[in-house]
Amino acid sequence: MRKLIYIAEDDMVSFYFLEEVLTPLKVKIKQAKNGEELLQLIHEKVPDLVLLDLRMPVMSGLDALAVIRKNHPGLPVVAQTAYAMTEERERCFQCGCNDYISKPIRKTALLKIVEPYLGLS
């Protein structure tokens, strides 16, 4: 059975890049354009992995993460953010992210991070 990844990303160019990189892994991908959409998707079906943009409209990634950790503490969540500062990285881990990748995202770095969560390495 194919692994399911939710990509919470409001920027379509970023979403299409992630989709292009991940599709060869034979995964099923669904997009959420904000934190509320992500929580609705998770309510309907818990995925194998979430790629979470931290800054989105309606509900931020960090606000959505707080709900995810309350309801699904074991769900792997990888933060993605344009803010590559050390403080941002530490904040991601303190808030409950399993991993972190900074934008612009490089294909090899993304694959190195997601493959273990999908059981591919």
Image (cartoon, rainbow, N blue to C red):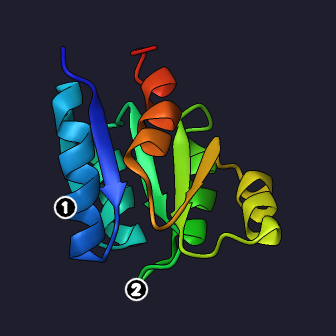
- Categorize mark 2 by other alpha carbons within 10 Å: few (<14), some (14-19), many (20+): few
**Observer-nearest residue: 22 or 65?**
22
The x and y percentages for residue 115 are: 43, 26
Asked if residue 69 lies left or right of residue 92, the reply is left
Decide which of tag 1 and tag 2 comes sooner along the chain.
1
Q: Three-letter amino acid code at disc 2? A: Pro
Q: Which mark is residue 6?
A: none
Q: Secondary structure at mark 1?
A: helix
For residue 57, the mark is 2
| Quadrant that contains the N terminus | top left
Residue 3, quarter of picture: top left
- Outermost residue to the bottom: 57
| Mark sitting on residue 16 | 1
Q: Secondary structure at mark 2?
A: loop
Q: From the viewer's perspective, is 63 left or right of 106?
A: right
Relative to 37, is 70 above or below? Answer: above
* C-alpha separation, residue under disc 1 versus residue under disc 2: 18 Å
Q: Is residue 103 above or below residue 75?
A: below
